[in-house]
Amino acid sequence: MVTVEEVREVALALPRTKEHLIHDRVKFRVGQIVYVAFSRDETVMGFAYPREERDSLIAAAPEVFHLPRPSELRYRWVQAWMAALEPDEMRELVIEAWRMVVPKKVSAAYPVG
């Protein structure tokens, strides 16, 4: 199980990340682009993820991952149940979501792994 505090530690260590509280929801973004957000009750973490790969991710672990609500399907976004996420998996997902929203030169300067 992963907590919002654990995600916060990972996200705030990433260059250009800012934390915001918007409509009672914790969100992490770079500039105006949100790459991780939580449900109000903090049981679900949404994160940026390549649209063309999300069906495979969900099929591989439907007990962990699910699609966002229909109105958000146009975005590059997937959701995960916090109780089902492992810390290492969360770290990888948060970093990869961040890589999707920062300039390539910023991403390239951040070590992989």
Image (spheres, grey):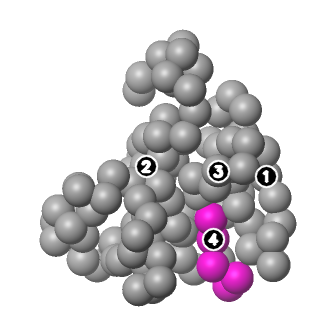
The residue at which mark 4 appears reads as: 38
The numbered mark, 1 or 4, whose residue comes first in the sequence reads 1
The amino acid beneath tag 2 is Leu
Q: Label 1 to label 3, Cα distance in Å?
A: 11 Å
Q: Residue at x 69, y 42 (%)?
A: 30
The residue at which mark 3 appears reads as: 33
Q: Quadrant of residue 4?
A: bottom right
Q: Quadrant of residue 62?
A: bottom left
Mark 1–mark 3 contact, CB under 8 Å? no
Q: Secondary structure at mark 1?
A: strand
* Magenta highlight range: 37-41
Q: Label 1 to label 2, Cα distance in Å?
A: 17 Å
The amino acid beneath tag 1 is Glu
Q: Is residue 53 visible?
A: yes
The residue at which mark 2 appears reads as: 93
Specify few, some or many for label 3: CA neighbours under 10 Å numbering under 14, 14-19, or 20 or more: some
Q: Label 2 to label 3, Cα distance in Å?
A: 16 Å
Tag on residue 19?
Answer: 1
Q: Measured from the top left, where is residue 70 in percent x and y?
A: 41, 86
